[in-house]
Amino acid sequence: MSAFDSFPLGQPAFVTNVLDRAAHLRRDDEKLFAMEQKPSSRAYVIYRDSLLVKRDGERVRALLSIDEALNCGANPGTIFLGLRDGAAVFGMGLSQAAAEKLVGREDYTVTELRGMAMQGAILPDELSAVAMAKSMVSWHQRHGYCANCGTRSAMKEGGWKRECPACKAEHFPRTDPVVIMLVASGGKCLLGRQKQFPPGMYSCLAGFVEAAETIEDAVRREIFEESGIRCTDVEYYMTQPWPYPSSLMIGCSARALNEDIVVDHSELEDARWVTRDEAALMLTRTHPDGLAGPHPFAIAHHLLGRWLRDKSGA
């Protein structure tokens, strides 16, 4: 089975949640500490945008025992992610110094998460838990001080809260909403590319939802700002957690009201209308000009695939 087969239509990466979050356990420090000591407990260890994995021959294993994680230098003070089949699963961070000590080892390696997900090296049903671990570890690393008074804050409730010892302010993990949209006009759809994309790759346009803005308004605004296209008939499709560092991709479709593209080059390198036939070739990586669509692990692929399947669409 190829990596493409791992993400059938409607099932991008990071959406299959197999953990019971067991939020009722987060306030029980004694119980959580005891669970950390159990041989059955496991952890995902995060380093920046990468994951610590154990090599088992040709395969890699991302879910480590607590002892394996600690022996590789993972930071104590674990984040409780939830339960899987009754066993506790935690998220742990790895310092730069600890990551550097692993260089050259044959049994453990630190590998970029996105690449492993795209290659199918990690099972799809693990990716949601990995995304949770990455988002939470990143949040703690970025928010160690109280935003209200500047005092070093403390991890509470299994990592799902930070509390300031000085002013008693409470801080909680945040998720940033992002709209990503398939805009169509007749038998064509609008795709764009950013400078950092691989050569020839185009994808759906996307952007952050701003303060006091509806999802529909964000879709219309982002499309117009990036491409000069006005659109209407915004419809919701599905969402995808995106741990870079912690976003929620809100997949939508819309109908264009004009077709004259004016690219905002501060946002996009290019934007173009693509026919259904071209889009199908791009998704299968068989376009004669070497153009390619988004990988199936990303929600953009599924927005495009859904549009191709629904030939009665806009």
Image (cartoon, helix red, strand yellow):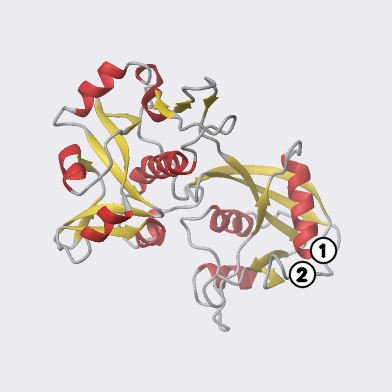
User: Which residue occupies 35% across, 35% down?
Assistant: 18
Mark 2 is on which residue type? Answer: Val
Q: Quadrant of residue 105?
A: bottom left
In three-dimensional space, the C-alpha distance between marks 2 and 1, rounded to whole angstroms, equals: 7 Å
Pointers 2 and 1 in contact (CB under 8 A)? Answer: yes
In the image, residue 53 lies at what x, y percent? Answer: 24, 53
Tell me if residue 27 comes above or below residue 158 in the rendering. above
Q: Describe the element under mark 2 as helix, strand or loop.
A: loop
Residue 263 is tagged as: 2
Q: Mark 2 or mark 1: which comes first in sequence?
A: 1
Tell me if residue 228 comes above or below residue 54 in the rendering. below
Judged left or right of residue 67, residue 96 is right
Q: Residues within 10 Å of mark 1 (few under 14, many from 20)?
A: some
Residue 228 is tagged as: 1
Q: Quadrant of the N terminus?
A: bottom left
Judged left or right of residue 25, residue 58 is left
In the image, residue 217 lies at what x, y percent? Answer: 78, 44
Mark 1 is on which residue type? Answer: Gly
Q: Quadrant of residue 133?
A: top left
Q: Describe the element under mark 1 as helix, strand or loop.
A: loop
The residue furthest bottom is: 289
Q: Residues within 10 Å of mark 2 (few under 14, many from 20)?
A: some
Q: Is residue 297 visible?
A: yes
Q: Nearer the viewer, residue 133 or 284?
A: 133
How many numbered circles does the render carry? 2
